[in-house]
Image (cartoon, rainbow, N blue to C red):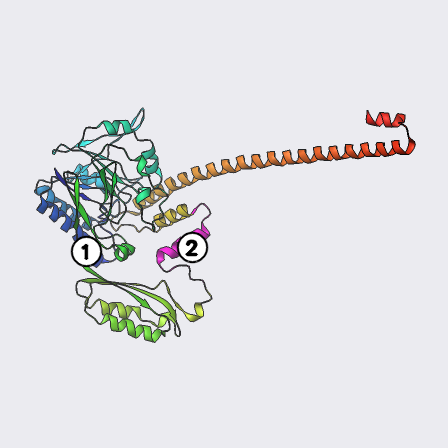
């Protein structure tokens, strides 16, 4: 038995940047062609096949043509939803393509007496495939918590568990994902765990079985293009994974230090760098430091970009950490866009950092060209509503916790006051006893008044 494990193709990403959008699509095509060359029995796509639930129809057409290359070769394709494929308020394109027979979804969830049952799909090779969707909120974590593991563990081997979520023990340090699942919540007794969602290639294991994230085929963000070193997918033969690298271009990456330069000198340095040959390469530059004179606006980045593009496929210039001297009094809160957003969100977040970040990313999503305003607004509202419900539950729990703590503090305060009063009464009685003793010494006898006072 031989299959391909692919994830995070994000077809349709870089929609405003045609060169990168087409490279991303080319990476998917190369992966499918390699699957045909390797003569795999089936392809398992562990989420985020598309970058949007309803992508541009031109991207859909090209993607279907590519997948038909595998189908025409007799290779079956199985898919689960990723966080980008999933749509709470409308039908996802995955549902449409599954109905058309392009591939088969392996997400079959039912409610049972002991929790959520995931029904298996049996492939012709004899292996059973079980899948759980990736969502855009904490709901997927809750699903893992209430899975009927007894049912899953009783499924006959060989079997594969496909998922699209972050595993707590495996997430890279730069990912702040509070909706992570510990390994302990994965069902046991599977022969292979096919992960998606993390864009880096990660190889691990669970009870001796491979637990794999193949990573992105190309990348879905500019940050992906910067940090990812190897891109591809896994060919798995008899549950022994082998990484297959996919390369559609080269990357030229360079950090430019502007410390001590004038704006004019930096402009000349960048133009000189742009004059070199970058054929077949995507150029990624990080310009950082403090200009000793001149303004950042004096640097002609448009001219520099056009000069690079004379030979390069594309050029990405990051200037988030570039500043001029007179701006030194202003705090620089990050070197990258992601760091700046993180720190700004932390300052303005009233309902928690993760809530603000997720809401921001939902609201800044662009409407696909072929989607109506009404459908797009409904989809956004559905996602925001789900996020607000989760935030409301968290706030309600926090408020209850605050009330309990307040009651505890009030109780402790009453006890302290009571102790003080008791100590005060005790001191008063001692003073009265000392007074009576002094009177006794002075008069030499006990008076009726003293007796009544002591009674």
Which residue is pictured at 54% across the width and 37% down the height? Answer: 405
- In the image, residue 305 sits, relative to residue 347, either above or below, namely below
Q: Which mark is residue 344?
A: 2
Which residue is pictured at 35% across the width and 57% down the height? Answer: 337
Location of residue 181 (image quadrant): top left
**Quarter of the rendering occupied by the C terminus:** top right
Which residue is pictured at 64% across the width and 36% down the height? Answer: 416
Q: CA distance from mark 2 to mark 1?
A: 33 Å
Q: Nearer the viewer, residue 61 or 25?
A: 25
Q: Which mark is residue 391?
A: none
- In the image, residue 177 sits, relative to residue 341, either above or below, namely above
Mark 2 or mark 1, which has the lower sequence index? 1
Q: Is residue 351 left or right of residue 203?
A: right
Q: Nearer the viewer, residue 355 or 59?
A: 355
Q: Which residues are magenta?
A: 331-352
Residue 257 in the image, given as x and y percentages of width and height = 33, 68
Q: Is residue 220 in the magenta section? A: no
Which element is circle 2 on? helix
Q: Are marks 2 and 1 in contact (CB under 8 Å)?
A: no
> Is residue 127 visible in the rendered structure shown here?
yes
- In the image, residue 298 sits, relative to residue 330, either above or below, namely below
Instruction: Provide the residue designation for mark 1.
Output: 23
Residue 339 in the image, given as x and y percentages of width and height = 37, 56
Q: Is residue 344 in the magenta section? A: yes
Q: Is residue 29 left or right of residue 270?
A: left
Q: Is residue 100 left or right of residue 411?
A: left
Residue 333 in the image, given as x and y percentages of width and height = 42, 59
- In the image, residue 17 sits, relative to residue 268, either above or below, namely above
Residue 342 in the image, given as x and y percentages of width and height = 39, 53
Which element is circle 1 on? helix
> Is residue 193 visible in the rendered structure shown here?
no
């Amino acid at each position: 038995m031989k299959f391909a494990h692919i994830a995070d193709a994000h077809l349709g990403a870089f929609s405003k940047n045609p060169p990168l959008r087409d490279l991303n699509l080319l990476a998917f095509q190369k992966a499918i062609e390699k699957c045909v060359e390797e003569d795999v029995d089936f392809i398992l796509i562990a989420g985020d096949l598309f970058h949007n639930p309803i992508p541009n129809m031109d991207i859909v057409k090209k993607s279907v043509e590519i997948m038909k290359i595998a189908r025409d070769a007799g290779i079956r394709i199985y898919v689960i939803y990723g966080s980008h494929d999933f749509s709470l308020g409308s039908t996802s394109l995955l549902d449409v393509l599954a109905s058309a027979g392009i591939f088969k979804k392996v997400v079959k969830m039912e409610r049972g007496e002991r929790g959520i049952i995931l029904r298996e799909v049996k492939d012709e090779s004899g292996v059973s495939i079980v899948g759980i969707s990736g969502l855009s909120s904490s709901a997927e974590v809750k699903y893992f918590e209430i899975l009927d593991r007894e049912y899953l563990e009783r499924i006959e081997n060989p079997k594969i568990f496909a998922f699209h979520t972050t595993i707590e023990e495996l997430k890279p340090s730069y990912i702040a994902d509070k909706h992570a699942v510990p390994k302990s919540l994965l069902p046991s007794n599977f022969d292979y765990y096919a992960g998606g969602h993390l864009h880096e290639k990660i190889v691990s294991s669970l009870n001796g079985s491979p637990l794999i994230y193949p990573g992105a085929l190309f990348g879905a963000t500019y940050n992906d293009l910067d940090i990812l070193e190897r891109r591809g997918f896994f060919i798995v033969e008899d549950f022994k994974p082998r990484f297959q690298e996919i390369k559609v271009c080269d990357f030229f990456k360079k950090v430019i230090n502007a410390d001590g330069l004038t704006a004019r000198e930096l402009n000349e340095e960048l133009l000189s760098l742009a004059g070199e040959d970058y054929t077949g390469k995507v150029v990624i530059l990080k310009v950082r430091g403090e200009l000793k004179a001149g303004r950042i606006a004096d640097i002609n980045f448009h001219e520099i970009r056009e000069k690079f593009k004379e030979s390069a496929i594309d050029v990405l210039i990051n200037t988030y950490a570039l500043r001029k001297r007179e701006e030194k009094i202003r705090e620089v809160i990050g070197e990258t866009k992601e760091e700046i957003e993180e720190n700004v969100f932390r300052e303005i977040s009233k309902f928690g950092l993760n809530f603000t970040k997720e809401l921001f990313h939902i609201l800044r999503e662009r409407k696909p060209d072929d989607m109506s305003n009404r459908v797009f607004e409904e989809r956004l509202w559905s996602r925001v509503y789900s996020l607000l419900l989760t935030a409301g539950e968290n706030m309600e729990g926090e408020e209850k916790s605050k009330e309990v703590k307040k009651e505890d503090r009030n109780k402790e305060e009453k006890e302290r006051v009571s102790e003080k009063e008791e100590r005060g009464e005790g001191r008063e009685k001692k003073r009265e006893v000392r007074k009576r003793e002094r009177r006794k010494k002075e008069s030499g006898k006990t008076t009726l008044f003293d007796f009544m006072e002591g009674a």
